[in-house]
Image (tube, grey):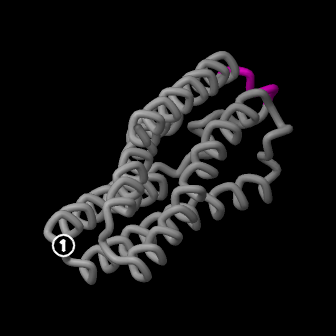
Amino acid sequence: MTVYGFWLYLMTDCILFASIFAVYAVLVNNVAGGPAGHDIFELPYVLGETALLLFSSITYGFAMLAFFRGNKKQVLGWLALTFLFGLGFIGMEVNEFHLLISEGYGPSRSGFLSGFFTLVGTHGLHVTAGLIWMAVMMYQVNKHGLTATNKTRLSCLSLFWHFLDVVWICVFTVVYLMGTL
């Protein structure tokens, strides 16, 4: 029942992100004389962010495989590596936001930038929530071991983490790739 409920939550997140993507699509050309995506996006930098998040998905998969093999030490190791990749992603995203805002390209500058910061920022907040959840799960696995409850929780976190990867691929494609054309 817990996993079913979590799937329902993910569906509401799909609706949230679909709504924000729709708003972004409406606002993308409203630059108000300011910069457009091709003026401000650094594609190699964003490719680095993308690589970190995609690698984190792979390492999370290894953590789940270790769980099914009953290897607590490997579960914790893979979760720690996943956490570091996710933290690196967030660090790069915060740095990108800082650079844009310091150059005068904040969310209040134009409709495009407002949509950009809302979409990318919402994804970043979700990744941050996932990192907090992951830290809690590392504590739980370390303290209580590879229990059935931890298996369910890690499975739900796995769904969430991979969902965020899929959303990021959409963000990368729609915002960054199409924005640099």
| Residue 129 in view | yes
Residue name at image x 20 percent, y 69 percent: 66
Image height of 86 relative to 157, above or below:
below
Q: Position of residue 110 (x, y in %)?
A: 80, 31
Residue name at image x 40 percent, y 34 percent: 4
Query: How many residues crowd mark 1 within 10 Å: few (<14), some (14–19), many (20+)?
Result: some
State left or right for residue 74 relative to residue 30: left
Q: Position of residue 99 (x, y in %)?
A: 70, 60
Image height of 74 relative to 5, above or below:
below
Q: Secondary structure at mark 1?
A: loop
Give the main secondary structure of the magenta stretch. loop
The stretch of residues the image draws in magenta is 29-33
State left or right for residue 113 relative to residue 20: right
Image height of 70 relative to 169, above or below:
below
Q: Quadrant of the N terminus?
A: top left
| Residue 88 in view | no
Question: Is 30 part of what is drawn in magenta?
Answer: yes
Query: Hey, which quadrant is residue 25 in on the image?
Result: top right
Per the image, the residue denoted by label 1 is 70
Image height of 129 relative to 62, above or below:
above
Residue name at image x 32 percent, y 67 percent: 147
Question: Is 47 part of what is drawn in magenta?
Answer: no
Q: Position of residue 88 (x, y in %)?
A: 49, 69
Question: In front: 4, or 94?
Answer: 4
Going by the numbered disc 1, the residue's amino acid type is Gly
State left or right for residue 151 relative to residue 42: left
